[in-house]
Amino acid sequence: MSQDNTPPRDEPGPEHGPGPVPPARNVPSASNVPPPPPFAPSSGFHPEGFQQPDEGQQQAPPSGDPVKRQRLVIGGIVVGALVLMGVVIWVLLNLLGARPEAAAPTPSASASLGPLPRDTDSKDFQVGDCFANFDPNASKARAVACDTEHTAQLGAAYTYPQDNSFPGTNALKEKGREVCTGIKFNAAANEYTTLLKQAVYPSTSSWERGDRRVDCFIVVNPGNTIKDDLLQK
């Protein structure tokens, strides 16, 4: 919406009819009246109604220097950007300082038990271990490298909590079938046609001694051997 700022024109005074004629004044004769002085407009008057500056007098500059204002605005923007950058850097430094250090990888139990081949207690078996002349009823087995001849490989395992009571033989058998179902073979397993899955679980007496493991081994028929790692990584 625009606004008309044009000042109003000068309005004429109220129209009145001619008033009563004043009485005639004692007008001196033309011969006795001195002539009026010639008209000379004052130096401060201009026909358009503006003040005419005197010669040599400098006109006052407009209030406020636009160049100075522009510099102040640019300076404020620069200062604000520097403050913002400082805040961002401070936040990043705090986040980096609070980041926990990466935990060092924990070596596997197999690596900590020493080089292969070695005799290993059943409680120390690790998924992926390969065993020569494997006997599921023995408390120890001969662990060997999986690219050498072996008769079994531990494919999967489940450990009950130590405070659990003996679940019963049937429950342990069912848990063994469940553990064996989770084994996934790699392509090398296709080279063997006599592979079987065998679950091994605690007896009542071994449970009392702290045995809580249910293992599932990949085995072959007697007289056959395996020379590969058969588990999918």
Image (tube, grey):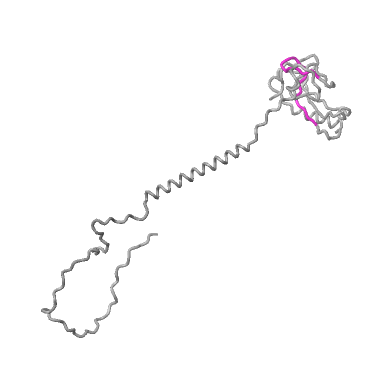
Asked if residue 146 lies left or right of residue 167, the reply is left
Residue extending furthest toward the bottom = 23
Q: Residue at x 80, y 25 (%)?
A: 123
Quadrant of the frame with the N terminus: bottom left
Asked if residue 202 lies left or right of residue 230, the reply is right
Main secondary structure type of the part rendered in magenta: strand
**Magenta stretch bounds:** 141-159
Residue extending furthest toward the left = 31
**Which of 162 and 222 lies nearest the eye of the viewer?**
162
Residue extending furthest toward the right = 205
Across and down, in percent, residue 19 comes to: 25, 83
Q: Residue at x 38, y 59 (%)?
A: 2
**Which of 169 and 202 lies nearest the eye of the viewer?**
202
Q: Is residue 17 magenta?
A: no
Across and down, in percent, residue 105 comes to: 68, 28
Across and down, in percent, residue 125 comes to: 78, 24
